[in-house]
Image (cartoon, rainbow, N blue to C red):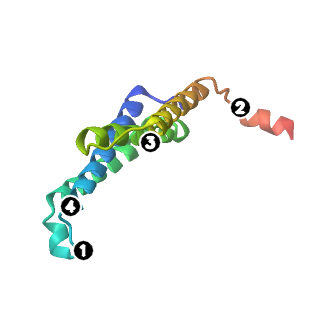
Amino acid sequence: METKPWAIATVLLCTLLISVAQIFYKLSVKTLDFNLISAITNINLLIGIALYGIGGILLVLSFKGGEVSVLYPIIATGYIWVSFLSKYFLNEEMNYYKWSGVFIIALGIMIIGLGSKKNKKISLSEVQNVS
């Protein structure tokens, strides 16, 4: 099955939503006490949970449009999103090692994408003839 562009876009949107959810989780811990009332009244925590849920549903739907071996590695873009979002919204610092990691993750995703396009399909009869 060839992976459709809408499925790739949906996984990217999923990773963005989940990454934004993680920023909301981080913001929620400033006022979070470990009791039920604090959890259900913490708006940042609730937004994070909602975004995570929407992202999960989108991920499942995206699998309908392509191969898991192509789509799932795109989830690694979440590390990239979180790096940029945490720098912008949480004023966290990005050093050489973090930028190198972002670059390596992006390169790895591209290599996986290229590998999936050049993948030759092997039929069952070819496999049986080898054995």
Amino acid beneath label 4? Lys
Q: Is residue 54 left or right of residue 129?
A: left
Label 4 CA crowd tier, 10 Å (few <14, some 14–19, many 20+): few
Disc 4 target residue: 30
Under tag 1, what secondary structure? loop
Disc 1 target residue: 34
Of the residues under marks 4 and 2, which one precedes in the sequence? Answer: 4
Q: Quadrant of residue 77?
A: top left
Disc 2 target residue: 122
**Mark 4 → mark 2, Cα distance in angstroms:** 54 Å
Disc 3 target residue: 75
**Mark 2 → mark 3, Cα distance in angstroms:** 27 Å
In this rendering, which labeled residue sits more in front, label 2 or label 3?
3
Under tag 3, what secondary structure? helix
What residue lies at 29% left-to-right and 53% top-to-bottom?
53
**Mark 1 → mark 2, Cα distance in angstroms:** 54 Å
Q: Quadrant of the C terminus?
A: top right
**Mark 3 → mark 1, Cα distance in angstroms:** 30 Å
Which residue lies most toward the bottom here? Answer: 35
Q: Position of residue 109 (x, y in %)?
A: 52, 32
Which residue lies most toward the right here? Answer: 131
In this rendering, which labeled residue sits more in front, label 1 or label 2?
1
